[in-house]
Image: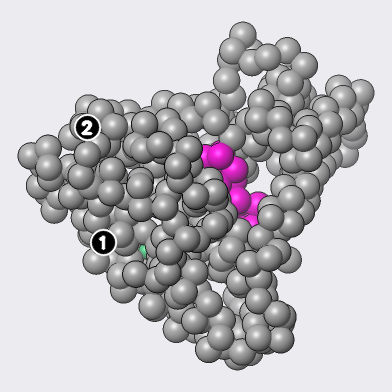
């Protein structure tokens, strides 16, 4: 039964391409747009596709090695468009999903971005021998997720205690895109590895869908929160910064590749453990402005309690049994968790700058935890 179709966020049939006149000529995004609007050629790379892939390689190199932020935005925003083709409207740009150029694009992007990010987290990884012990891996997740650096604290405190309603609204809008895709990231981790894992993920999916009550589905809760603030989410995110794109894409870089399955599970564990304090800060901030969290912003309110349970459940139902069955998965799970923490720290930096929530110049660099567990 359809409760209210207008609450549904159905993927746009045309995909999430920006119009050609908004896109810099010669960029990856521009060449990608032409390929997505072009004919479907399943097995052939035409000269245009070769130019696209060569430009992608160049821009990845400029961004990842040279630190060029425009190049990073170009490649991560383009990859977001590609994942939205994979996950979006079935009658839209998904027509290219088996094309040689489309898969080459994903492969080049995924390998380069993962290589770069893994280099950044190498010094946070434990010795591989330790990571073969289930208890060690569980404790590693608990410790890492509870660490708050100065920037994390700045953002959470600002949301709870100082943020204006406009700042809170912009936070919620920036956060929205992932909230509609989180279910998909879970679903993509569902193919069988162990029954206990399937069982645990199924419970999370059931929660996401409202535990049998449609209007309690987390996406619909979020839509109602947007409405409370008279907000909408444009098809193309308003991010204008590579960091939120990179963090969003990471879920699908990992989830869309079986060989990264354990990393995907490690990455999914982190927000369950980390986000409880963030959600509590958002609710506190909104209540400062006269709203009632449990009625006006069910999404954030329900996740405070929900994730307080999900985090430990994920450790017991996913992390421990996998490492017990396959000790070599331990370092993979940890790598996925560390990649997610890197992405979350980058996102916090972005939030602090975009919303003016603090002075990022005085905050710690991403990944550098300066304070111990809470
Ligand atoms: Fe949720
Ligand atoms: Fe959760």
Tell me which numbered mark, 2 or 1, is placed earlier along the sequence: 2
Tell me, yes or no, if residue 226 can be seen here. Answer: no
Tell me, yes or no, if residue 167 can be seen here. Answer: yes
Disc ID at residue 208: none
Judged from the image, the secondary structure of the residue bearing numbered disc 1 is helix
Q: Any magenta on residue 194?
A: no
Q: Nearer the viewer, residue 366 or 316?
A: 366
Determine which residue is flagged by label 2.
Answer: 164
| Residue at the image position 47 percent from the left and 64 percent from the top | 270
In this picture, is 307 found above or below 58?
Answer: below
Label 2 near ligand 1 (CB < 8 Å): no
**Horizontal and vertical percent position of residue 206:** 35, 66
Determine which residue is flagged by label 1.
Answer: 304
Q: Nearer the viewer, residue 172 or 203?
A: 172
Q: Colour mode?
A: one colour
Within-10-Å neighbours for mark 2: few <14, some 14–19, many 20+: some
Within-10-Å neighbours for mark 1: few <14, some 14–19, many 20+: many
Q: Nearer the viewer, residue 20 or 244?
A: 244
Q: Nearer the viewer, mark 2 or mark 1?
A: 2
Judged from the image, the secondary structure of the residue bearing numbered disc 2 is loop
Q: Which residues are magenta?
A: 243-256
Which quadrant does the C terminus fall into? bottom left
Question: How far apart, in angstroms, are the residues tagged by discs 2 and 1?
Answer: 21 Å
Q: Any magenta on residue 250?
A: yes
């Amino acid at each position: 039964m359809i409760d209210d179709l207008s609450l549904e966020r159905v993927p746009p049939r045309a995909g999430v391409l920006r119009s050609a006149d908004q896109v810099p000529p010669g960029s990856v995004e521009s060449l990608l747009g032409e390929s997505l609007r072009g004919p479907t050629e399943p097995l052939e790379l035409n000269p245009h596709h070769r130019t696209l892939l060569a430009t992608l390689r160049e821009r990845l190199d400029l961004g990842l090695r040279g630190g060029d932020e425009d190049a990073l935005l170009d490649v991560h925003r383009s990859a977001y468009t590609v994942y939205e083709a994979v996950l979006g409207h079935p009658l839209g740009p998904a027509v290219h999903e088996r094309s040689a150029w489309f898969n080459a694009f994903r492969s080049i992007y995924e390998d380069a971005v993962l290589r770069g990010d893994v280099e950044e987290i190498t010094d946070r990884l434990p010795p591989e021998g330790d990571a073969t012990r289930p208890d060690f891996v569980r404790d590693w997740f608990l410790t890492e997720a509870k660490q708050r650096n100065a920037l994390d604290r700045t953002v959470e405190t600002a949301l709870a205690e100082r943020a204006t309603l406009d700042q809170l609204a912009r936070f919620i809008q920036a956060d929205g895109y992932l909230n509609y895709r989180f279910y998909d990231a879970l679903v993509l981790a569902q193919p069988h590895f162990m029954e206990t894992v399937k069982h645990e993920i199924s419970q999370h999916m059931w929660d996401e869908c409202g535990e049998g009550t449609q209007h309690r589905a987390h996406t619909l809760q979020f839509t109602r929160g947007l409405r409370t603030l008279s907000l909408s989410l444009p098809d193309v995110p308003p991010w204008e910064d590579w960091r939120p794109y990179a963090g969003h894409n990471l879920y699908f870089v990992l989830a869309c590749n079986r060989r990264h399955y354990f990393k995907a599970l490690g990455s999914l564990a982190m927000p369950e453990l980390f986000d409880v304090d963030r959600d509590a800060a958002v609710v506190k901030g909104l209540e400062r402005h006269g709203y009632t969290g449990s009625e006006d912003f069910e999404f954030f309110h329900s996740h405070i309690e929900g994730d307080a349970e999900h985090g430990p459940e994920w450790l017991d139902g996913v992390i421990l049994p996998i490492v017990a069955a396959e000790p070599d998965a331990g370092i993979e799970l940890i790598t996925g968790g560390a990649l997610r923490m890197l992405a979350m720290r980058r996102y916090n930096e972005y939030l602090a700058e975009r919303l003016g929530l603090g002075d990022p110049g005085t905050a710690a660099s991403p990944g550098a935890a300066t304070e111990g567990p809470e």
